[in-house]
Image: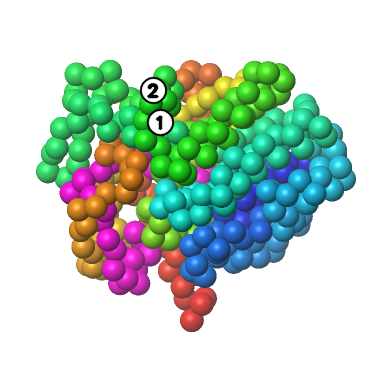
Amino acid sequence: MNIALVTGSAGLIGSESVAFFADKFDLVIGIDNNLRQYFFGTDASTEWNRNRLAEAYPNYEHYTADIRKVEELEPIFKKYGTDITLIVHTAAQPSHDWAAREPFTDFSVNATGTLNMLEMTRQNCPEAVFIFTSTNKVYGDNPNYLPLIETETRWEIDENHPYFKNGIDEQMSIDHTKHSLFGASKVAADILVQEYGRYFGMKTGIFRGGCLTGPNHSGAQLHGFLSYLMKCAITGNHYTIFGYKGKQVRDNIHSYDLVNMFWHYYQNPRAGEVYNAGGGRYANCSMLEGIAICEEISGNKMSYSYSETNRIGDHIWYISDLSKFKEHYPGWNWTYDLKQTLVQIHDGMVQRLQLQK
Protein backbone atom coordinates (compact mmCIF):
# COMPACT_ATOMS: atom_id res chain seq x y z
CA MET A 1 0.00 0.00 0.00
CA ASN A 2 1.17 3.53 -0.83
CA ILE A 3 0.13 6.12 1.78
CA ALA A 4 0.36 9.92 2.07
CA LEU A 5 0.04 11.45 5.53
CA VAL A 6 -1.01 15.10 5.87
CA THR A 7 -1.00 17.16 9.07
CA GLY A 8 -3.28 20.17 9.31
CA SER A 9 -5.39 18.27 6.79
CA ALA A 10 -8.51 20.42 7.21
CA GLY A 11 -6.58 23.66 6.71
CA LEU A 12 -5.86 25.45 3.46
CA ILE A 13 -2.71 23.63 2.29
CA GLY A 14 -3.55 20.42 4.11
CA SER A 15 -6.93 20.05 2.42
CA GLU A 16 -5.46 20.96 -0.96
CA SER A 17 -2.86 18.24 -0.39
CA VAL A 18 -5.55 15.68 0.44
CA ALA A 19 -7.44 16.55 -2.74
CA PHE A 20 -4.30 16.54 -4.88
CA PHE A 21 -2.91 13.24 -3.61
CA ALA A 22 -6.19 11.31 -3.27
CA ASP A 23 -5.91 9.90 -6.79
CA LYS A 24 -2.16 9.35 -6.55
CA PHE A 25 -2.03 7.27 -3.35
CA ASP A 26 -3.99 4.25 -2.13
CA LEU A 27 -4.79 6.01 1.13
CA VAL A 28 -4.47 9.57 2.43
CA ILE A 29 -4.31 9.95 6.20
CA GLY A 30 -5.22 13.30 7.71
CA ILE A 31 -4.25 14.60 11.14
CA ASP A 32 -6.09 17.71 12.32
CA ASN A 33 -7.65 18.61 15.70
CA ASN A 34 -9.09 21.99 14.62
CA LEU A 35 -6.74 24.07 16.77
CA ARG A 36 -7.39 26.88 14.29
CA GLN A 37 -10.74 27.43 16.00
CA TYR A 38 -8.92 27.81 19.33
CA PHE A 39 -6.47 30.26 17.78
CA PHE A 40 -8.91 32.48 15.89
CA GLY A 41 -12.47 31.73 17.02
CA THR A 42 -15.53 29.94 15.70
CA ASP A 43 -15.46 31.66 12.30
CA ALA A 44 -12.03 30.13 11.64
CA SER A 45 -13.12 26.57 12.40
CA THR A 46 -12.02 24.03 9.81
CA GLU A 47 -14.71 21.50 10.66
CA TRP A 48 -16.61 22.30 7.44
CA ASN A 49 -13.51 21.45 5.43
CA ARG A 50 -12.90 18.22 7.30
CA ASN A 51 -16.48 17.13 6.55
CA ARG A 52 -16.05 18.11 2.90
CA LEU A 53 -12.95 15.93 2.56
CA ALA A 54 -14.62 12.94 4.19
CA GLU A 55 -17.53 13.18 1.74
CA ALA A 56 -15.43 13.84 -1.36
CA TYR A 57 -12.61 11.29 -0.99
CA PRO A 58 -13.44 7.68 -0.03
CA ASN A 59 -9.75 6.86 0.51
CA TYR A 60 -9.31 9.65 3.08
CA GLU A 61 -9.00 8.65 6.74
CA HIS A 62 -9.05 11.31 9.46
CA TYR A 63 -7.40 11.36 12.90
CA THR A 64 -7.91 14.10 15.49
CA ALA A 65 -4.47 13.53 17.01
CA ASP A 66 -2.46 16.40 18.52
CA ILE A 67 1.00 16.72 16.94
CA ARG A 68 2.32 18.00 20.29
CA LYS A 69 1.75 14.56 21.83
CA VAL A 70 3.94 11.67 20.70
CA GLU A 71 1.59 9.24 22.41
CA GLU A 72 -1.16 10.27 19.97
CA LEU A 73 1.06 10.18 16.88
CA GLU A 74 2.90 6.94 17.56
CA PRO A 75 -0.06 4.55 17.11
CA ILE A 76 -0.77 6.06 13.68
CA PHE A 77 2.82 5.66 12.52
CA LYS A 78 3.09 2.17 14.00
CA LYS A 79 -0.12 1.10 12.26
CA TYR A 80 0.99 2.09 8.76
CA GLY A 81 4.80 1.98 9.06
CA THR A 82 6.78 1.96 5.84
CA ASP A 83 3.61 2.09 3.74
CA ILE A 84 3.78 5.83 4.42
CA THR A 85 5.88 7.22 1.57
CA LEU A 86 4.93 10.90 1.76
CA ILE A 87 4.40 13.22 4.72
CA VAL A 88 3.13 16.76 4.16
CA HIS A 89 3.45 18.66 7.42
CA THR A 90 1.29 21.77 7.26
CA ALA A 91 -0.09 21.94 10.84
CA ALA A 92 0.97 25.16 12.57
CA GLN A 93 0.10 28.17 14.68
CA PRO A 94 0.41 30.77 11.89
CA SER A 95 -0.01 34.23 13.45
CA HIS A 96 2.55 36.81 14.67
CA ASP A 97 0.11 38.43 17.07
CA TRP A 98 -1.35 35.24 18.48
CA ALA A 99 2.10 33.80 19.21
CA ALA A 100 2.82 36.67 21.61
CA ARG A 101 -0.34 35.82 23.58
CA GLU A 102 0.66 32.21 24.25
CA PRO A 103 4.36 31.63 23.51
CA PHE A 104 4.35 28.14 25.04
CA THR A 105 1.46 27.04 22.82
CA ASP A 106 2.98 28.60 19.72
CA PHE A 107 6.37 26.94 20.22
CA SER A 108 4.89 23.58 21.19
CA VAL A 109 2.82 23.45 18.00
CA ASN A 110 5.36 24.85 15.55
CA ALA A 111 8.66 23.56 16.89
CA THR A 112 7.94 20.60 19.20
CA GLY A 113 5.17 19.34 16.92
CA THR A 114 7.57 19.37 13.98
CA LEU A 115 10.23 17.53 15.97
CA ASN A 116 7.65 14.90 16.93
CA MET A 117 6.68 14.41 13.29
CA LEU A 118 10.31 14.12 12.21
CA GLU A 119 11.12 11.54 14.88
CA MET A 120 8.02 9.48 14.15
CA THR A 121 9.05 9.49 10.50
CA ARG A 122 12.67 8.54 11.25
CA GLN A 123 11.61 5.71 13.56
CA ASN A 124 8.81 4.25 11.45
CA CYS A 125 9.17 5.22 7.78
CA PRO A 126 12.64 6.75 7.30
CA GLU A 127 12.51 6.47 3.50
CA ALA A 128 9.38 8.63 3.27
CA VAL A 129 9.59 12.07 1.69
CA PHE A 130 8.97 14.69 4.39
CA ILE A 131 7.68 18.07 3.19
CA PHE A 132 7.48 20.99 5.60
CA THR A 133 5.55 24.21 5.04
CA SER A 134 7.85 26.84 6.51
CA THR A 135 7.34 30.58 6.01
CA ASN A 136 9.04 33.69 4.67
CA LYS A 137 8.86 34.97 8.26
CA VAL A 138 12.04 32.97 8.97
CA TYR A 139 13.85 35.92 7.33
CA GLY A 140 12.51 38.16 10.08
CA ASP A 141 12.39 41.83 9.20
CA ASN A 142 15.58 41.68 7.10
CA PRO A 143 13.53 42.40 3.93
CA ASN A 144 12.54 45.77 5.45
CA TYR A 145 16.14 46.99 5.16
CA LEU A 146 16.21 46.58 1.40
CA PRO A 147 16.25 49.84 -0.65
CA LEU A 148 12.50 50.40 -0.96
CA ILE A 149 10.73 53.14 -2.88
CA GLU A 150 7.19 54.38 -2.20
CA THR A 151 4.86 54.59 -5.21
CA GLU A 152 1.21 55.59 -5.43
CA THR A 153 -0.22 52.20 -4.41
CA ARG A 154 2.73 50.15 -3.16
CA TRP A 155 6.25 49.91 -1.85
CA GLU A 156 8.68 48.60 -4.45
CA ILE A 157 12.36 47.68 -4.42
CA ASP A 158 14.88 49.82 -6.28
CA GLU A 159 15.09 48.58 -9.87
CA ASN A 160 18.89 48.43 -9.67
CA HIS A 161 18.83 45.91 -6.81
CA PRO A 162 19.47 42.21 -7.63
CA TYR A 163 16.11 41.29 -6.05
CA PHE A 164 14.13 43.56 -8.38
CA LYS A 165 13.75 41.07 -11.23
CA ASN A 166 12.64 37.92 -9.39
CA GLY A 167 12.35 38.75 -5.68
CA ILE A 168 14.07 37.51 -2.52
CA ASP A 169 16.09 34.29 -2.76
CA GLU A 170 16.98 31.63 -0.19
CA GLN A 171 20.37 33.19 0.58
CA MET A 172 18.85 36.04 2.60
CA SER A 173 20.01 35.71 6.22
CA ILE A 174 17.59 34.34 8.82
CA ASP A 175 19.88 35.63 11.59
CA HIS A 176 20.32 38.98 13.42
CA THR A 177 16.75 40.11 12.80
CA LYS A 178 13.40 40.52 14.54
CA HIS A 179 11.15 37.58 13.70
CA SER A 180 8.19 37.78 16.10
CA LEU A 181 7.76 34.74 18.35
CA PHE A 182 5.87 33.00 15.55
CA GLY A 183 8.80 33.58 13.20
CA ALA A 184 11.22 32.28 15.82
CA SER A 185 9.27 29.06 16.38
CA LYS A 186 9.09 28.49 12.63
CA VAL A 187 12.86 29.10 12.34
CA ALA A 188 13.39 26.36 14.92
CA ALA A 189 11.19 24.00 12.93
CA ASP A 190 12.77 25.01 9.61
CA ILE A 191 16.27 24.26 10.89
CA LEU A 192 15.15 20.95 12.42
CA VAL A 193 13.75 19.77 9.09
CA GLN A 194 16.93 20.81 7.32
CA GLU A 195 19.01 18.98 9.91
CA TYR A 196 17.08 15.72 9.63
CA GLY A 197 17.90 15.86 5.93
CA ARG A 198 21.54 16.80 6.29
CA TYR A 199 22.38 14.80 9.44
CA PHE A 200 20.23 11.69 9.01
CA GLY A 201 20.04 11.77 5.22
CA MET A 202 16.24 11.86 5.22
CA LYS A 203 14.35 13.20 2.21
CA THR A 204 13.24 16.46 3.78
CA GLY A 205 12.13 19.51 1.82
CA ILE A 206 11.45 22.96 3.28
CA PHE A 207 9.10 25.34 1.48
CA ARG A 208 9.21 28.93 2.75
CA GLY A 209 5.83 30.24 1.75
CA GLY A 210 4.79 33.78 0.98
CA CYS A 211 1.05 34.38 1.33
CA LEU A 212 -0.62 31.02 0.79
CA THR A 213 -4.19 31.33 -0.37
CA GLY A 214 -7.10 29.66 -2.11
CA PRO A 215 -10.83 28.96 -1.91
CA ASN A 216 -10.62 26.59 1.07
CA HIS A 217 -9.00 29.06 3.45
CA SER A 218 -10.77 29.78 6.75
CA GLY A 219 -9.46 33.34 6.84
CA ALA A 220 -9.38 35.36 10.07
CA GLN A 221 -8.20 38.86 10.99
CA LEU A 222 -4.91 37.58 12.35
CA HIS A 223 -4.21 35.15 9.51
CA GLY A 224 -5.31 34.61 5.93
CA PHE A 225 -4.84 38.00 4.26
CA LEU A 226 -6.68 37.56 0.94
CA SER A 227 -9.35 35.22 2.29
CA TYR A 228 -10.25 37.53 5.17
CA LEU A 229 -10.10 40.57 2.89
CA MET A 230 -12.59 39.01 0.49
CA LYS A 231 -14.77 37.91 3.39
CA CYS A 232 -15.00 41.53 4.54
CA ALA A 233 -15.79 42.63 0.97
CA ILE A 234 -18.68 40.15 0.78
CA THR A 235 -20.12 40.58 4.29
CA GLY A 236 -19.46 44.29 4.78
CA ASN A 237 -17.40 43.62 7.91
CA HIS A 238 -14.89 46.34 8.73
CA TYR A 239 -11.26 45.74 7.74
CA THR A 240 -8.27 47.38 9.45
CA ILE A 241 -5.00 48.02 7.62
CA PHE A 242 -2.02 47.93 9.99
CA GLY A 243 0.81 50.29 9.08
CA TYR A 244 2.97 51.12 6.07
CA LYS A 245 0.17 53.24 4.50
CA GLY A 246 -1.51 50.08 3.24
CA LYS A 247 1.19 49.84 0.59
CA GLN A 248 2.93 46.75 1.98
CA VAL A 249 3.39 44.12 -0.73
CA ARG A 250 2.82 40.37 -0.51
CA ASP A 251 3.20 37.71 -3.14
CA ASN A 252 0.35 35.21 -3.22
CA ILE A 253 0.43 31.57 -4.32
CA HIS A 254 -2.68 29.47 -4.89
CA SER A 255 -2.80 26.38 -2.69
CA TYR A 256 -2.95 24.13 -5.77
CA ASP A 257 0.25 25.60 -7.18
CA LEU A 258 2.06 25.09 -3.88
CA VAL A 259 0.93 21.47 -3.55
CA ASN A 260 1.98 20.90 -7.15
CA MET A 261 5.45 22.04 -6.04
CA PHE A 262 5.29 19.31 -3.37
CA TRP A 263 4.40 16.73 -6.03
CA HIS A 264 7.36 17.66 -8.20
CA TYR A 265 9.67 17.52 -5.19
CA TYR A 266 8.28 14.13 -4.10
CA GLN A 267 9.15 12.57 -7.43
CA ASN A 268 12.81 13.65 -7.18
CA PRO A 269 13.57 14.73 -3.59
CA ARG A 270 16.75 16.46 -2.44
CA ALA A 271 17.70 15.92 1.21
CA GLY A 272 17.44 19.00 3.45
CA GLU A 273 16.73 21.37 0.56
CA VAL A 274 15.14 24.80 1.07
CA TYR A 275 12.90 26.57 -1.43
CA ASN A 276 11.10 29.89 -1.39
CA ALA A 277 7.49 29.37 -2.45
CA GLY A 278 5.18 32.21 -3.39
CA GLY A 279 3.50 34.06 -6.20
CA GLY A 280 6.74 35.83 -7.10
CA ARG A 281 6.51 38.50 -9.76
CA TYR A 282 3.65 36.49 -11.29
CA ALA A 283 1.12 37.14 -8.50
CA ASN A 284 1.54 39.87 -5.89
CA CYS A 285 -0.25 42.93 -4.58
CA SER A 286 -0.22 45.61 -1.92
CA MET A 287 -3.01 45.91 0.64
CA LEU A 288 -4.52 48.83 -1.28
CA GLU A 289 -4.30 46.94 -4.56
CA GLY A 290 -5.87 43.86 -2.96
CA ILE A 291 -8.78 45.94 -1.64
CA ALA A 292 -9.39 47.39 -5.10
CA ILE A 293 -9.50 43.92 -6.69
CA CYS A 294 -11.84 42.58 -3.98
CA GLU A 295 -14.18 45.54 -4.53
CA GLU A 296 -14.16 44.91 -8.28
CA ILE A 297 -14.93 41.17 -7.96
CA SER A 298 -17.54 41.49 -5.19
CA GLY A 299 -19.17 44.62 -6.56
CA ASN A 300 -19.14 46.05 -3.03
CA LYS A 301 -17.42 49.10 -1.61
CA MET A 302 -15.32 47.94 1.34
CA SER A 303 -15.43 49.43 4.81
CA TYR A 304 -11.88 49.83 6.04
CA SER A 305 -9.71 52.06 8.17
CA TYR A 306 -6.01 52.59 8.74
CA SER A 307 -3.91 52.12 11.87
CA GLU A 308 -0.40 53.57 12.06
CA THR A 309 0.68 50.61 14.21
CA ASN A 310 2.23 47.93 12.03
CA ARG A 311 2.46 44.34 13.18
CA ILE A 312 5.78 43.48 14.83
CA GLY A 313 8.14 41.78 12.38
CA ASP A 314 5.79 42.44 9.46
CA HIS A 315 7.25 42.83 5.97
CA ILE A 316 6.98 46.07 3.99
CA TRP A 317 7.82 44.35 0.71
CA TYR A 318 8.17 40.65 0.12
CA ILE A 319 8.22 38.85 -3.22
CA SER A 320 9.58 35.29 -3.42
CA ASP A 321 12.23 34.30 -5.93
CA LEU A 322 11.34 30.80 -7.17
CA SER A 323 14.28 30.55 -9.59
CA LYS A 324 15.99 27.81 -7.58
CA PHE A 325 12.92 25.58 -7.50
CA LYS A 326 12.18 26.16 -11.18
CA GLU A 327 15.78 25.27 -12.03
CA HIS A 328 15.56 22.02 -10.03
CA TYR A 329 12.04 21.20 -11.28
CA PRO A 330 11.59 22.84 -14.71
CA GLY A 331 8.26 21.08 -15.29
CA TRP A 332 6.54 23.22 -12.65
CA ASN A 333 4.94 26.63 -13.17
CA TRP A 334 2.13 28.73 -11.74
CA THR A 335 -1.40 28.06 -13.01
CA TYR A 336 -3.42 30.69 -11.08
CA ASP A 337 -2.80 34.42 -11.23
CA LEU A 338 -3.96 36.81 -8.51
CA LYS A 339 -7.36 37.67 -10.00
CA GLN A 340 -8.21 34.05 -10.82
CA THR A 341 -7.40 33.11 -7.23
CA LEU A 342 -9.54 35.90 -5.78
CA VAL A 343 -12.49 34.99 -8.02
CA GLN A 344 -12.26 31.42 -6.69
CA ILE A 345 -12.09 32.67 -3.11
CA HIS A 346 -15.11 34.92 -3.70
CA ASP A 347 -17.25 32.23 -5.32
CA GLY A 348 -16.39 29.59 -2.72
CA MET A 349 -17.06 31.95 0.15
CA VAL A 350 -20.41 33.11 -1.24
CA GLN A 351 -21.46 29.47 -1.58
CA ARG A 352 -20.46 28.62 2.02
CA LEU A 353 -22.17 31.70 3.44
CA GLN A 354 -25.38 30.80 1.61
CA LEU A 355 -25.27 27.27 3.04
CA GLN A 356 -24.92 28.69 6.54
CA LYS A 357 -28.15 30.68 6.24
Span of residues in magenta: 229-256
The x, y position of residue 351, in whole percent, is 47, 69
For image coordinates 52% across by 76% down, the residue present is 355
For disc 1, the marked residue is: 139
Q: Is residue 80 left or right of residue 297?
A: right
Question: Farthest right residue?
Answer: 79
In the rendered structure, which amino acid carries the disc numbered 1?
Tyr
The x, y position of residue 39, in whole percent, is 52, 60
In the rendered structure, which amino acid carries the disc numbered 2?
Met
Q: Quadrant of residue 55?
A: bottom right
For image coordinates 60% across by 47% down, the residue present is 109
Rendered position, 349 above or below 61: below
Badge count: 2
For image coordinates 20% across by 26% down, the residue present is 147
Tell me if residue 249 can be seen. Answer: yes
How far apart are the alpha carbons under marks 1 and 2?
7 Å
The quarter of the picture where the N terminus appears is top right
Question: Farthest bottom residue?
Answer: 357
For disc 2, the marked residue is: 172
Quick check: marks 1 and 2 in contact, CB under 8 Å? yes
User: Toward the viewer: 354 or 67?
Assistant: 67
For image coordinates 50% across by 45% down, the residue present is 255
User: Toward the viewer: 70 or 75?
Assistant: 70
Tell me if residue 246 can be seen. Answer: no
In the rendered structure, does residue 313 fall within the stretch colored magenta? no
User: Toward the viewer: 186 or 267?
Assistant: 186
In the rendered structure, does residue 236 fall within the stretch colored magenta? yes
The x, y position of residue 28, in whole percent, is 74, 47
Q: Earlier in the sequence, mark 1 or mark 2?
A: 1
Residue 16 is labelled as none
Q: In what element is the residue under mark 1?
A: helix
User: Toward the viewer: 323 or 182?
Assistant: 182
